Amino acid sequence: MRISKQFILLMGILILILSGCRLNNSVKPLSSEEKAVDVAYSDVPTIFLHGAGGGKHSLGGMLNRFTNQEVAQKSLVLTVSKDGIVSEKKALKDGHFSKDNPMVQVLFEDNRNNEWEQAAWIKAVLVFLQENYQVKTVNLVGHSMGGISEFRYLLQDGTNATLPKVNKFVAIGSPFNEFLDTFDSQSLDDLLIAGPSQRSERFILYENELDGMPKDVDVLLIAGKLSENDLSDKVVPLSSALSVNMMLMNNGNNVEHVIITGADHSGLHENKEVDEKVSHFLWYKN
């Protein structure tokens, strides 16, 4: 059977295209030309954790956008089993993170368990990164319940010197005061300065355990509201997502808060303004 020159040429082009796709999907360091001059690049990994019922798509889009913007690089996906066993989808070939602001997506198989179990799994993730990739410092980002579990981890193990140190913590739409809306009895300014006028059992536990929170962790609280009159993201009240502002400031932490208008709960991690706030907080130079 004779093969035309046109067919051979077409197959060659197809192979080059497919090869290019494989290269684009691999983890490789950014070149100096690709790096943004106003971004502070390092090998400190940032852990991204989904909320209750979440999975790979919950924060996957955000990680892909940061990678495409070349401010950070999605480097690893870790799955934690119901028994707390950590496994990686694809190990880093050279055994360490590149200095391109690596991002680690963490997926819980039991994605609806309580904050105490999930805090233990976060600890297991940090131990895994420490033992396998010699990680000494991390950042934490959590959406909804993910932020709650990360805060629980910080209260319980944040000062443990044998574990990687947490530099920065970002909570996106996290119900720190459960689902209490206190704006019927207080203003936003009052909430930020004095704390919530009504405290849930979860919030009271935080107050009682605040001594465990490292004072040198910088915190960004991101809260959503549907409109100027609807002060919730359809799931978490604005007042709940910002309820720990006063608590953390009194603890000595540097705390920033951002209110996103027009995004519902799941839409927060798909919002361009949220992307900008998170990336600037984590990686941009002061």
Image (cartoon, rainbow, N blue to C red):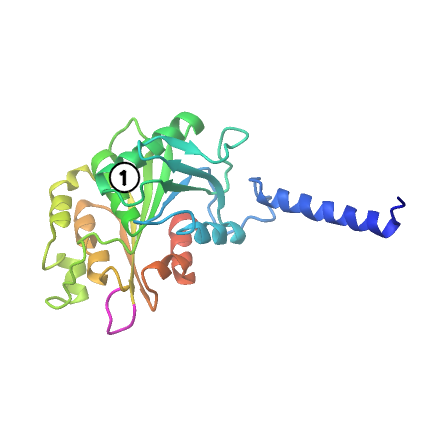
Residue drawn at x 11%, y 47% is 204
- Could you tell me residue 233's position as x and y percent? 28, 63
Q: Quadrant of residue 110?
A: top left
Q: Would you name the residue on which mark 1 appears?
A: 118
Drawn side of residue 62 relative to residue 5, left or right: left
- Could you tell me residue 120's position as x and y percent? 27, 34
Residue 242 visible in image:
no
Query: Residue 75 versus residue 51: which sits nearer the camera?
Result: 51
Residue 51, magenta (yes or no): no
Drawn side of residue 20 relative to residue 275, left or right: right
Above/below status of 182 relative to 158: below
Chief secondary structure of the magenta portion: loop
Question: Over which residues does the magenta segment extend?
Answer: 226-232
Which amino acid, by three-letter code, is at mark 1?
Answer: Gln
Drawn side of residue 7 relative to residue 252, left or right: right
Drawn side of residue 78 relative to residue 212, left or right: right
- Could you tell me residue 69's position as x and y percent? 52, 54
Query: Residue 129 versus residue 191: which sits nearer the camera?
Result: 129
Residue drawn at x 49%, y 51% is 64
Query: Residue 83 versus residue 198: which sits nearer the camera?
Result: 83
Q: Quadrant of the N terminus?
A: top right
Residue 227, magenta (yes or no): yes
Query: Residue 211 versus residue 174: which sits nearer the camera?
Result: 174
- Could you tell me residue 180's position as x and y percent? 15, 59
Q: Residues within 10 Å of mark 1 (few under 14, many from 20)?
A: many
